[in-house]
Image: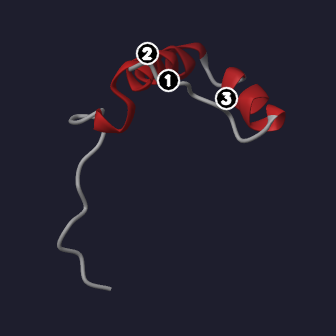
Amino acid sequence: MIYQLLFFNASVQSEIQDWPTQIFASFVRIAEQMEVSGPNLGLPYTKAIGGWVI
């Protein structure tokens, strides 16, 4: 299944595109992986927070 990454609004997308080149490139690489993996992105990008008591 292919997922689609949507921005909250145009100003968020614009701000992300203004990030320094290396940070933006890293974001794009991770975003592309998110489109393929969806909520199952996994380590090293996500980690379960289970067991926390607030």
Residue placed under numbered mark 3 in the picture: 16
Closest to the observer: 22 or 53?
A: 53
Label 3 crowding class (10 Å Cα cut-off): few <14, some 14-19, many 20+? Answer: some
Seen in the picture, residue 38 relative to 28 is either above or below; the reply is below
Q: Position of residue 31 (x, y in %)?
A: 48, 23
CA–CA distance between discs 1 and 2? 5 Å
Residue 28, percent across and down?
Answer: 51, 17
Kind of residue indicated by mark 2: Arg
How is the rendered protein coloured?
Answer: secondary structure
Q: Are marks 1 and 3 in contact (CB under 8 Å)?
A: yes
**SS at circle 3:** helix
Q: Secondary structure at mark 1?
A: helix
Identify the residue shown where x is 38% and y is 20%. 1
Which label's residue is closer to the chain start, 3 or 2?
3
Q: Is residue 28 left or right of residue 45?
A: right
Q: Residue at x 51, y 14 (%)?
A: 25
Q: Mark 2 — residue?
A: 29
Circle 1 residue: 27
Position of residue 23 in the picture relative to residue 30 (left or right): right
Quadrant assignment for the C terminus: bottom left
Q: Amino acid at mark 1?
A: Phe
- Determine whether 8 is above or below 36 in the image: below
Q: Extreme front residue here?
A: 1
